[in-house]
Image (cartoon, helix red, strand yellow):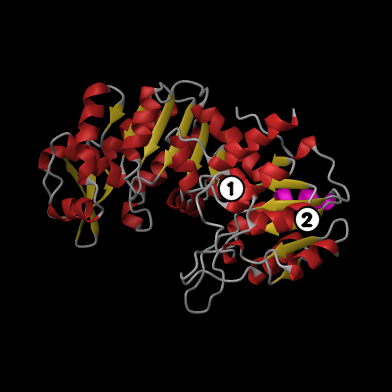
């Protein structure tokens, strides 16, 4: 378990607490309105509410989009949504670290909440640099003297060594917020000392990380079994010598995935008993679901799901597991005809007694659309940070919190 401090280690009453959260939300490119408030709600209902109720003067730092992109907008809407979530007034200032921002921070009373504007308005926010270098930036040198504590609650951005993620930890006592703490606790259960058997389910459309995740969890004896599905399943089938057909091969080429084949072949040779590939598939023929065996490949139709025999095989493995990581749906669950694989595997996880971690945007959308999210042990809102963690990489934001904890002791 990472050694970091949490909100339990500090008395925050009457203290200025600088909280870095991940409010980054989908935005309508035309109207510039926020389309989904999941992340704002998550941070608001946990860390921000707790700090406010404990009498802290809460200063919120967050980013939205990247400069030049359609979703790069002010955080004023985010502050309004946060106000609705908390049922109390939330202040906003259209400044990040200038005099307007500093004056608004100084005027805060205990329990009040202030949202600063988009931290990526600071030109060097997104520069990848060491905590020490970022601690000398204008952002940190202007805000740190006004604060008593820095709280990093942005696990979803912790894989970036950005100024607002790592810079404050050099100058201020620092703690993990509740979202960060919960993410790391959940991940430790499936990465550091998982209860066995441990099963990883790798599906979805983004298969570029599947090789590195599989290799890491198998080489380090974290996973007993890796179940492949979705585009990842297609890739592993190709590595085993199957021709998945023109439309499916074109998709692999388009996504520049074929370079992974040699590494996947090596992995399959190294762990032949621990990697499962689909044994039948569901293709779309004139809008309808049709199942085919591997012997019936190649196909001129798009593969949109795993087949019934694969579902039965994977379900049996899931039911026997004690720890499960689900990253990516096995099929195009948005289409009713091809929801079967995703629905069946989630139902198997829900009925198992295993600790289950669900990660990735499409996985979350799928489990929520099926009404099964409440039956999962933990649903992670992180994307890139979760993938980096599952590949065994150190996250700069987490390392910075650990370094700060060591200094305090």
Q: Which mark is residue 133?
A: 1
- Please report the residue visible at 35 percent of the width from the left and 43 percent of the height from the top: 203
Mark 1 and mark 2: Cα distance apart in space: 25 Å
The image quarter containing residue 96 is bottom right
Is the C terminus in the top left, top right, bottom left or bottom right quadrant? Answer: top right
Of 65 and 207, nearer the camera is 65
Is 153 located above or below residue 271 in the figure?
below
In the rendered image, the quadrant that contains the N terminus is top right
Q: Is residue 353 visible?
A: no
Mark 1 vs mark 2: give the one in front. 1
The circle on residue 53 is none
Q: How many marks?
A: 2
Pointer 1: residues within 10 angstroms few (<14), some, or many (20+)? few
- Chain part drawn in magenta: 46-53
- Residue 304 in magenta stretch: no
Neighbor class of circle 2 (other Cα within 10 Å; few <14, some 14-19, many 20+) is many
Which residue in the structure is indicated by mark 2?
Answer: 58
Residue drawn at point x = 50 percent, y = 68 percent: 67
């Amino acid at each position: 378990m990472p050694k970091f401090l949490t909100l339990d280690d500090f008395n925050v009453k009457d203290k200025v607490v600088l909280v870095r959260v991940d409010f980054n939300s989908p935005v309508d490119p035309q109207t510039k309105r926020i389309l989904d408030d999941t992340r704002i709600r998550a941070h608001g209902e946990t860390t921000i509410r707790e700090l406010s109720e404990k009498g802290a003067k809460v200063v919120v730092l967050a980013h939205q989009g990247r400069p030049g992109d359609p979703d790069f907008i002010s955080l004023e809407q985010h502050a309004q949504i946060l106000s609705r979530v908390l049922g109390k007034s939330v202040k906003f200032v259209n400044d990040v670290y200038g005099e307007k921002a500093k004056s608004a921070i100084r005027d805060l009373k205990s329990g009040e909440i202030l949202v600063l504007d988009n931290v990526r308005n600071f030109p060097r926010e997104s520069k990848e640099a060491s905590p020490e270098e970022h601690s000398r930036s204008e952002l940190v040198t202007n805000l740190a003297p006004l604060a008593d504590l820095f709280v990093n609650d942005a696990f979803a951005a912790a894989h970036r060594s950005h100024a607002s993620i790592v810079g404050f930890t050099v100058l201020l006592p620092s703690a993990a917020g509740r979202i960060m703490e919960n993410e790391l606790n959940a991940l430790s259960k499936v990465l550091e000392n998982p209860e066995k058997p441990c099963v990883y389910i790798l599906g979805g459309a983004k298969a570029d990380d599947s090789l590195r995740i599989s290799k890491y969890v198998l080489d380090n004896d974290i996973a007993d079994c890796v179940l492949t599905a979705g585009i990842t399943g297609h890739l592993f089938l190709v590595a085993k010598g199957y021709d998945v057909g023109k439309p499916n091969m074109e998709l692999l080429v388009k996504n520049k995935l074929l370079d992974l084949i040699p590494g996947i072949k090596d992995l399959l040779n190294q762990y032949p008993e621990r990697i499962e590939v689909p044994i039948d598939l569901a293709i779309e023929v004139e809008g309808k679901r049709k199942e085919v065996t591997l012997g019936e490949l190649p196909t001129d139709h798009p593969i949109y799901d795993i087949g019934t025999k694969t579902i039965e095989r994977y379900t049996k493995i899931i039911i026997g597991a004690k720890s499960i990581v689900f990253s990516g749906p096995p099929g195009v669950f948005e289409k009713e005809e091809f929801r079967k694989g995703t629905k069946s595997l989630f139902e198997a996880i829900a009925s198992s007694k295993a600790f289950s971690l669900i990660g990735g945007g499409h996985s979350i959308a799928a489990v929520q659309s099926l009404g099964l999210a409440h039956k999962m042990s933990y649903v992670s809102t992180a994307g890139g940070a979760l993938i980096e963690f599952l590949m065994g990489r150190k996250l700069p934001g987490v390392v910075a919190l650990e370094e700060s904890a060591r200094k305090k002791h």
